[in-house]
Image (cartoon, coloured by chain):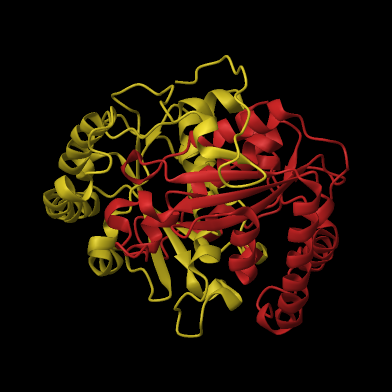
Chain colours: A yellow, B red
Amino acid sequence: MDFFAVVDTQRALRRFRPDPVPDAALDRILAAATRAPSARGAEPWYFVVVRDAALRAAIGADYRRAWTAAKAAAADADRDVRDRPHYARMMRAADALAAELGTVPVLIVCCLDHAQLGPIAAPDGGLRSPVAAYASIFPAVQNLCLAARALGLGTTLTTLHTAFAPTLAARLGIPPSVEVVALVPVGYPRDRFGPTRRKPVEEVAFLDRWGAPWPKLDRGGPRA
Amino acid sequence: MDFFAVVDTQRALRRFRPDPVPDAALDRILAAATRAPSARGAEPWYFVVVRDAALRAAIGADYRRAWTAAKAAAADADRDVRDRPHYARMMRAADALAAELGTVPVLIVCCLDHAQLGPIAAPDGGLRSPVAAYASIFPAVQNLCLAARALGLGTTLTTLHTAFAPTLAARLGIPPSVEVVALVPVGYPRDRFGPTRRKPVEEVAFLDRWGAPWPKLDRGGPRA
């Protein structure tokens, strides 16, 4: 697939078909993740690919409980975005994901090893520079999600596992120096890929100084 | 360009030709950045595209000073990676970048607005969940770097600006709620794009549980 066709149509997909995901596709997705940059070229990442049905069911139950709690708080916490066009649809899809996460064919648990961050982490594993630490893992997670889309597989980047991180670490045997940064469900989607709707570039880009307009160009193409 | 050809050959490029970068290319790169996912669909990002020569020179001088200080510490701090094959070459290129950053044709200053993070940030702007916050900006930065590569433009994701963040914010007029998360130089590269050398997938991926081997597949293709 063409690069920009992938990027322009990668959107969060939260409902999945039960069809199995081939090993070769997962391997290609993982290889793409590892092509990302990382501070010092350290490649401080690990990926646990969860296919085991009992493990997925258990993680799914953890996730559903965390979602129920988060959702109760969201009505107020999301007051700045809840009137935007995407919000109601996104929340319905997030509900569906929470109900079904345990049966999505594959969960990829994306991990950052603080012990491979050198001066970015302290000897006790605390992060001296969170920004430099997460700059060494979320590019890999994004490569993973884009590569999935290129192969016709849906994903969504979730971080709700932070509400049950110790439980998740225990279920998967993740060592103390390693932080799970994202839980990415992977499967053939029930919904369609984009194009995605976003703020236009001139609302989020400036030229030279904050507030100075970026020229509005005639872009053509599928921009909403 | 084919998606996987882009991902497999995107590497940090730190030496640039002086040729100007067209507005249309930058606009396409910025549009690609905005296609990334973000928590709550909030799109909490801004991009300041610095072309002004005096500003670039000033930021370049800030960067060079920070690099000189960081490099003095790196010999010890990087003892875990300094014997790897890539390290000496990476440090030479990083030296070159620090010497020349002020003359790279474009610097893209990537920003995360804490005021658009909803419950992820506290009312004072502090991050309640750094992982969820940075999960809403580094996928966009990675899209930006990949899109640049698709257009033949080199980039490298740097976070050294954290050593002079207040100075940088003052130079660009960045408001208090907004954090610069990356400074990305952009230009036509003097060095070649990848393929990149990475750990093989089976060293960083597990099946179902930490430590359980991911099958080594016959991958073909340009994996080192």
Image x and y of residue A82, in percent: 23, 37
Quadrant where the N terminus of chain B lies? Answer: top right
The residue that appears at 28% across and 50% down in the rendered structure is A52
Image x and y of residue B142, in percent: 57, 45
Q: Nearer the viewer, residue B26 or A122?
A: B26
Q: Is residue B141 visible?
A: yes
Image x and y of residue A193, in percent: 40, 24
Image x and y of residue A184, in percent: 36, 46
- Decide if residue B65 is on the left or right side of residue A80: right
Residue B198 against residue A157 in the figure, above or below: below
The residue that appears at 29% across and 51% down in the rendered structure is B118
Residue A163 against residue B26 in the figure, above or below: below
Q: Nearer the viewer, residue A184 or B35?
A: B35
Q: Nearer the viewer, residue B132 or A165?
A: B132
The residue that appears at 77% across and 50% down in the rendered structure is B13
Residue A21 against residue B92 in the figure, above or below: above
